[in-house]
Image: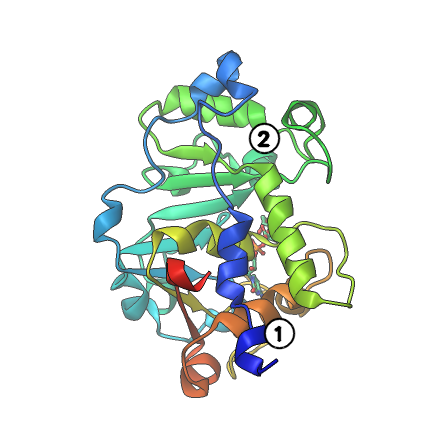
Amino acid sequence: DSFEEQYYPSTCLVMEAGVRVLRRKDAPFDKMPFGRLFPRQKLFRNIKNIKTCAIVSSAGSLAGSKLGRFIDTHDIVMRFNHAPTQGHEVDVGSKTTIRVVNSQVVTKPEFDFAHAPIFRNVTIAAWDPGKYNGTLEDWLTSSDYDLFTNYEIYRRRHPKSRAFLIDPHSVWRLWQTLQMFAGNRSIRRNPPSSGFIGLALLLPHCPQVDFVEYIPSTRLNGRCHYYSKEMNAACTFGSWHPLAAEKLMTLDMNTADDMSVFQFGILRIRRPDKLLC
Ligand code: NCC
């Protein structure tokens, strides 16, 4: 077989994982009062007009990048957890369309999920992995963190908000995709990072995704986050999340040249044509 015949695009694999938010009609939520908390709206408004999206990793090496203006030119800007824009606009921009947040951020009092301004007036996609083979019923009682209580408080306070829960089964399908891509190397059975979950959630909605400072650029500085002074290389290369496997797979999806990726810190991923997958 020629190389072309064997090659199956990793963008197709990620699309097939089908990372998605839970909807009211999904069992068992269709029969539960809790399910009525899910917004009726689509994840994004005016999906037909979405042409370009930016995903802003929280990496320390965004500090000094001056990518803010570039990031803000995108139709959709995705950020993670409590990563701030205020005071960092020059490097990370000021526009936020959607935040992907893990269940610790929803739960721990220090983040004040239900009230903090940073989680208002943006779309929220919250996730918790639950158990690997667990049902959705199991998930409701055995999530890693009880994100349901604060999600309910948030939704009751802000009934017009677009705040969704990510289908945990789809998070584990994404993990399986990573394992498939990694081939013989077993990756540990922990969920992907919010960054990779965010990419998989966004790609079906967006023809072109620019992922900023996910693959470490030459600005690499050892800092965990652009918004804190903590030094921790594991934030970039992984310890709990299968971060290295995610980043290898994401680099495989990249269409930008080395100058963009390693000097500017910008990866470009194009949504695959349906006929290709
Ligand atoms: O650090 P975190 O991630 O919020 O970062 C968001 C996403 O940016 C990418 N990243 C981050 C730092 C870095 N140096 N390089 C990167 O590529 C990753 O893709 C990451 O997903 C998370 O994924 O949700 C995570 O959340 C934190 C933490 O819970 C929140 O920040 C709230 O404090 C986790 N840290 C701890 O639990 C201590 C982190 O493991 C994963």
Image quarter in which the N terminus is found: bottom right
**x, y percent for residue 64:** 42, 75
The residue depicted at 47 percent of the width and 37 percent of the height is: 21
Cα separation, mark 1 vs mark 2, equals 31 Å
Ligand 1 quadrant in view = bottom right
Q: Is residue 271 visible?
A: no
The residue depicted at 46 percent of the width and 40 percent of the height is: 125
Amino acid carrying mark 2 in the image: Leu
The secondary structure type at the circle numbered 2 is: helix
Figure check: 238 above or below 1: above
> Which residue is situated farthest in the front direction here?
1
The residue depicted at 27 percent of the width and 46 percent of the height is: 47
Amino acid carrying mark 1 in the image: Gly
Figure check: 61 above or below 227: below
Front-lying residue, 192 or 157: 192
**Residue 229: quadrant of the picture:** bottom right
> On residue 222, which mark appears?
1
Front-lying residue, 107 or 132: 132
Q: Earlier in the sequence, mark 1 or mark 2?
A: 2
Residue holding disc 2? 147
225 sits to left or right of 46: right
**x, y percent for residue 112:** 51, 34
**x, y percent for residue 138:** 70, 25
